[in-house]
């Protein structure tokens, strides 16, 4: 019996690609190029399952409804799946899965890294040393913001947010508040001594640092906008490891330039890999190239999770991480 045909739209870690070869008749993206819309349409006609990533063009009705489509499942390599139009997938009868859980800790690590770096001006300081412009220690040089004991507000309080809470509360004694329309159990809230607030606006007004943990797209597009930046403390910092389109980048630039907020740490951007030009030159901004899950352990685990979803689908079972 022939193996199911599977396409990996981008290059995966070697260990995950090796397992894919063992399980399926797999096609690898050897040169790791971003596939065009036309290539993705051809993939729909030639493969039983396609494993896309957030860096692909959105897999929408134009791609899914191509004549002669063979593909029956999209096993996304990533926890976020706004790169897939799930309504169009449902309408076409195509199953969609993601890879939650396996990237939680590493993404939380990056959120804390951004928080610490922007608060303590670490990026600015490193650039100063590398440029050989540092002329030595003095009592008033590069005074920054203390992190320990400060108020950290969460917009969204799911898996990754709770992993950040673990590090921030128990590691840095931070006081936590959050807004989430689907809050965790009372046990989880009590564990972190967190305060549940009734709105995003309450979190913004209360926090010294605001960290975003919501899905991208839909009603969350430009969730952080001019009005909401204006609700934050002038001394506050924004941290985003969620999705780039959650933040209105031109509004963020204006808020930073006008001193409406003190700084920002960004791992994701609205039009990746393009970044709003003004952000590139701002000293009170720390910017990373979407590093949230970028450890060998996590990226291998994401590949394995995507393959587990595909294998369950081919075995006629409900995929463990189905989202549509």
Image (cartoon, rainbow, N blue to C red):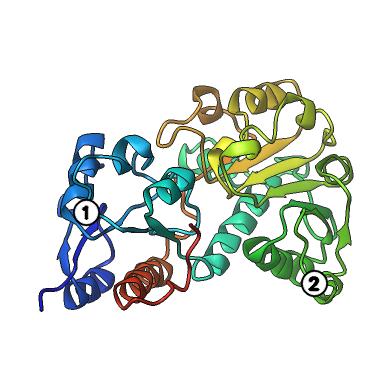
Residue 285 in sight in this render = no
User: Looking at the image, which residue is at 64% across and 32% down?
Assistant: 222
* Secondary structure category for the residue under label 2: loop
Q: Is residue 60 left or right of residue 254?
A: left
Label 2 close to label 1 by CB (< 8 Å): no
* Image disc number at residue 70: 1
* Secondary structure category for the residue under label 1: loop
User: Looking at the image, which residue is at 38% across and 59% down?
Assistant: 77
**What x and y, as percent, mark residue 62?**
32, 34
Tell me: residue 164, above or below residue 53. Answer: below
Q: Is residue 222 left or right of residue 258?
A: left
Tell me: residue 109, above or below residue 83. Answer: below
Tell me: residue 7, above or below residue 67. Answer: below
* Image disc number at residue 185: 2
Q: Point out the image quarter for the N terminus.
A: bottom left
Q: Nearer the viewer, residue 74 or 222?
A: 74
Q: Is residue 114 left or right of residue 93?
A: right
Residue 125 in which image quadrant: top right
Question: Nearer the N terminus, badge 2 or badge 1?
Answer: 1
**What x and y, as percent, mark residue 230?**
81, 28
Q: CA distance from mark 2 to mark 1?
A: 42 Å
**What x and y, as percent, mark residue 284?**
65, 35
**What x and y, as percent, mark residue 183?**
78, 62
User: Looking at the image, which residue is at 74% across and 70% down?
Assistant: 171
* Image disc number at residue 317: none
């Amino acid at each position: 019996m022939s193996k199911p045909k599977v396409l990996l739209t981008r290059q995966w870690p070697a260990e995950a690609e090796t397992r894919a070869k063992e399980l399926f008749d797999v096609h690898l993206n050897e040169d790791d190029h971003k596939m065009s819309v036309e290539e993705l349409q051809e993939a729909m006609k030639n493969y039983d399952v396609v494993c896309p990533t957030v860096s692909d063009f959105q897999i929408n009705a134009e791609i899914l409804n191509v004549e002669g489509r063979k593909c029956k499942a999209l096993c996304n390599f990533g926890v976020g799946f706004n790169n897939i139009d799930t309504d169009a997938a449902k309408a076409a009868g195509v199953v969609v899965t993601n890879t939650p859980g396996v990237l939680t800790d590493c993404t939380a690590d990056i959120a804390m890294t951004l928080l610490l770096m922007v608060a303590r001006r670490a990026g600015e300081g490193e650039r100063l040393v590398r440029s050989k412009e540092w002329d030595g220690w003095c009592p008033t040089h590069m005074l920054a913001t203390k992190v320990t004991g400060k108020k950290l507000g969460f917009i969204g309080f799911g898996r990754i947010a709770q992993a950040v809470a673990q590090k921030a509360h128990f590691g840095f004694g931070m006081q936590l508040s959050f807004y989430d329309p689907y809050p965790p159990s009372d046990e989880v809230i009590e564990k972190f001594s967190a305060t549940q607030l009734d709105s995003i606006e309450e979190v913004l007004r209360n926090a010294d640092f605001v960290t975003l943990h919501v899905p991208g797209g839909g009603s969350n597009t430009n969730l952080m906008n001019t009005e909401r930046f204006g609700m934050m403390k002038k001394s506050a910092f924004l941290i985003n490891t969620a999705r780039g389109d959650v933040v209105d980048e031109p509004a963020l630039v204006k808020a930073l330039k006008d001193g409406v907020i003190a700084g920002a740490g960004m791992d994701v951007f609205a039009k990746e890999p393009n970044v709003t030009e003004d952000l590139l030159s701002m000293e009170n901004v720390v910017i990373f190239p979407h590093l949230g899950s970028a450890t060998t352990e996590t990226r291998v685990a994401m590949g394995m999770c995507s393959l587990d979803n595909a294998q369950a689908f081919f075995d006629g079972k409900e995929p463990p991480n189905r989202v549509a």
